[in-house]
Image (cartoon, rainbow, N blue to C red):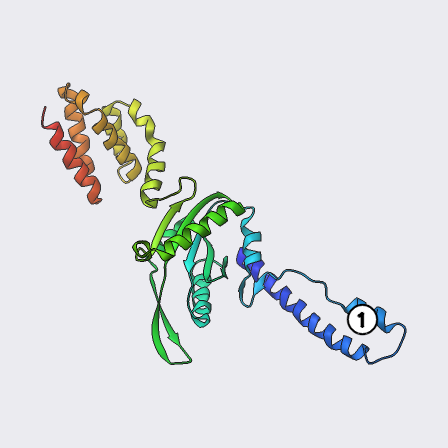
């Protein structure tokens, strides 16, 4: 939908541009005519000033801000575009075609909005092949990216994000990272995947109140649910001493661990299972 709306705005701005040019030519003609009504006509032809939504083929920074002012829970990405204009234009075209039309360029930095399901894709987009038609040479554009989650927009948050980005862009230790996720709220770099996993895991806090036979039965339905499995493993680890006190509970827990190990390919989970099993052998 937003693509359709932005294309329509672009068309309307082109129409306005054409009208402004015709008005300019008409004004030139009228200025050569000596008639009382000419001044009135010239005033009618005078263009009304407005803030353009597009700068060439891409969103203006003003338009970008207008689009995100009312957004909530979105991902703002900033990309280093300190490069020749020909590469900037190519990179903007690549990003708007591959990810979203909501990208803009200001002062050597590209600002954009991406959806949650695009994060992994843009995280892996580190080098873009580039052909310079003027020199007929092939090159690569290296992408340095910082992602900010914003629950809502404010100019103070944007200013903070700009400061963080500028700082990272100048620090060699971060310049090599290519993709950084930063929490404005906590003022620190975050492991996005770990943070997301922890948020999802919180949904299954009720597991702490469940008995192990019930968890064993439910596990067959949730065998592919990583946050659920992590919550189960966390419960086992937390209750390790109590589990060792009951042979019956210990047997159920061992069956749970065996089932998880047989039905998951996640190396980290399999290693956790082995660790818990070894700890339970102390019984």
Is residue 118 at least partly visible in the picture?
no
Q: Position of residue 198 (x, y in %)?
A: 33, 37
Above/below status of 162 relative to 230: below
Q: Is residue 219 visible?
A: yes
At 18% from the left and 27% from the top, the residue drawn is 253
Q: Residue at x 54, y 55 (%)?
A: 64
Residue located beneath label 1 in the image: 42
Q: Is 4 left or right of 97, judged from the image as shown?
A: right
The C terminus - image quarter: top left
Q: Given the current orientation, which residue lies at the most extreme left position?
A: 282
Work out whether 21 lies above or below 162.
below
**Image position, residue 23 (x, y; %):** 74, 72
Which of these two is toward me, 85 or 212?
Answer: 85
Residue 77 location in percent, x, y?
43, 53
Q: Is residue 225 left or right of residue 32?
A: left
* Residue ID at (33%, 26%): 206
Q: Residue furthest top?
A: 245
Which one is in front, 70 or 184? 184
- Residue 139 position by quadrant: bottom left
Left or right: where 209 falls relative to 263: right
The residue at 46%/66% (across/down) is 93
Q: Relative to 200, is 139 above or below? A: below
Image coordinates for residue 174, horizontal then vertical, percent: 32, 54
Q: Is residue 250 above or below residue 122?
A: above
Helix, strand or loop at mark 1: helix
Instruction: Give the class, few, some or many, for how many residues have Cα within 10 Å of label 1's Cα (few <14, many ≥20).
Output: some
């Amino acid at each position: 939908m937003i693509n359709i709306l932005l294309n329509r705005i672009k068309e309307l701005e082109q129409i306005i541009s054409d009208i402004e040019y015709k008005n300019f030519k008409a004004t030139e003609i009228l200025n050569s005519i000596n008639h009382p009504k000419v001044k009135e006509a010239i005033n009618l032809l005078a263009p009304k000033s407005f803030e353009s939504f597009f700068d060439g083929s891409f969103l203006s920074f003003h338009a970008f801000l207008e689009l995100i002012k009312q957004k909530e829970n979105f991902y703002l990405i900033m990309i280093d575009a300190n490069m020749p204009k020909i590469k900037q234009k190519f990179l903007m075209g690549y990003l708007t075609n591959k990810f979203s039309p909501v990208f803009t360029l200001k002062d050597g930095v590209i600002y954009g909005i991406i959806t949650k399901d695009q994060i992994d894709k843009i995280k892996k987009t580190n080098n873009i092949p580039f052909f310079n038609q003027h020199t007929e040479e092939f090159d690569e554009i290296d992408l340095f990216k910082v992602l900010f989650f914003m629950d809502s927009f404010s100019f103070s948050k944007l200013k903070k994000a700009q400061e963080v980005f500028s700082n990272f862009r100048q620090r060699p230790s971060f310049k090599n990272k290519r993709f950084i996720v930063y929490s404005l709220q906590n003022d620190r770099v975050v492991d996005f995947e770990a943070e997301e996993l922890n948020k999802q895991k919180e949904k299954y806090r009720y597991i702490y109140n469940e008995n192990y036979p019930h968890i064993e039965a439910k596990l067959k339905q949730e065998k592919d649910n990583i946050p659920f499995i992590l919550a189960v493993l966390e419960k086992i680890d937390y209750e390790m001493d109590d589990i060792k006190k009951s042979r019956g509970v210990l047997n159920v827990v061992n069956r749970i661990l065996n089932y998880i190990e047989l039905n998951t390919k996640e190396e980290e989970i399999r290693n956790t299972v082995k660790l818990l099993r070894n700890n339970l052998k102390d019984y």
